[in-house]
Image (cartoon, grey):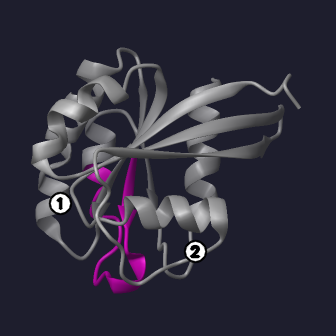
């Protein structure tokens, strides 16, 4: 098992966009409708099966509150890929993605990006983040941590970016 490559990936975005819920849904198969905000950073690991073989992801959950920015900056170090998550039912969180993109790229040079529209179960429109993803040359996926729609695809895409 130790010969499985380990890749660090970061999950970033405003508070309450569902970053922790996405990670818990993927790693533990659970969804909790109410969660306590992440303090600073948290992480979990999960083996992902890719067509080229298994990889292990170290998934770093970045706290979205502005007061944790100073803590987050060092936590990006070593990330090979980052998911920039916004809430499909809250347009302000999409408007903040350029700042999250800059933070990730500044603190993890060369990290590959993925844009994630979460809370598909609450959204009135689809595809609203695609233009931003295209503008930064990133793939775009939509997910629902509640229903699990798109969650496996999100982490497979992150694993492929990290391994590539």
Residue displayed at 42% across by 61% down: 20
Find the magenta span and give its range. Answer: 115-131
Q: Horizontally, is 99 left or right of 48 in the view?
A: left
Residue displayed at 40% across by 76% down: 120
Q: Is residue 148 above or below residue 130?
A: below
CA distance separating discs 2 and 1: 21 Å
Residue lying at the far top of the rendered structure? 109
Question: What SS does tag 1 mark?
Answer: helix
Question: What SS does tag 2 mark?
Answer: loop
Q: Is residue 77 above or below residue 49?
A: above
Residue displayed at 74% across by 45% down: 48
Q: How crowded is mark 2: few (under 14 residues within 10 Å), some or many (20 or more)?
A: many
The residue pinned by badge 2 equals 148
Q: Is residue 122 magenta?
A: yes
Q: Which mark is residue 141?
A: none
User: Foreground residue, 126 or 15?
Assistant: 15
The image quadrant that residue 67 belongs to is: top left
Q: Is residue 100 above or below residue 13?
A: above
Residue displayed at 35% across by 29% down: 75
């Amino acid at each position: 098992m130790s010969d499985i490559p380990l890749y660090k990936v970061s999950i970033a975005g405003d508070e309450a966009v569902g970053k922790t819920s996405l990670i818990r849904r993927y790693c533990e198969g659970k969804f909790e409708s109410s969660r306590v905000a992440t303090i600073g950073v948290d992480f979990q690991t999960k083996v992902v099966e890719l067509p080229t073989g298994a990889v292990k992801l170290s998934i770093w959950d970045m706290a979205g509150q502005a007061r944790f920015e100073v803590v987050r900056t060092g936590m990006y170090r070593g990330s090979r890929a980052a998911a920039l998550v916004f809430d499909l039912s809250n347009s302000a969180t999409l408007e903040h993605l350029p700042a999250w993109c800059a933070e990730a790229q500044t603190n993890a040079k060369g990290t590959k990006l993925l844009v994630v529209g979460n809370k598909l179960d609450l959204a009135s429109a689809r595809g609203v983040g695609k233009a931003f993803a295209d503008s930064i040359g990133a793939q775009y996926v939509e997910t629902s941590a509640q229903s699990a729609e798109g969650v496996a695809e999100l982490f497979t895409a992150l694993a492929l970016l990290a391994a590539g």
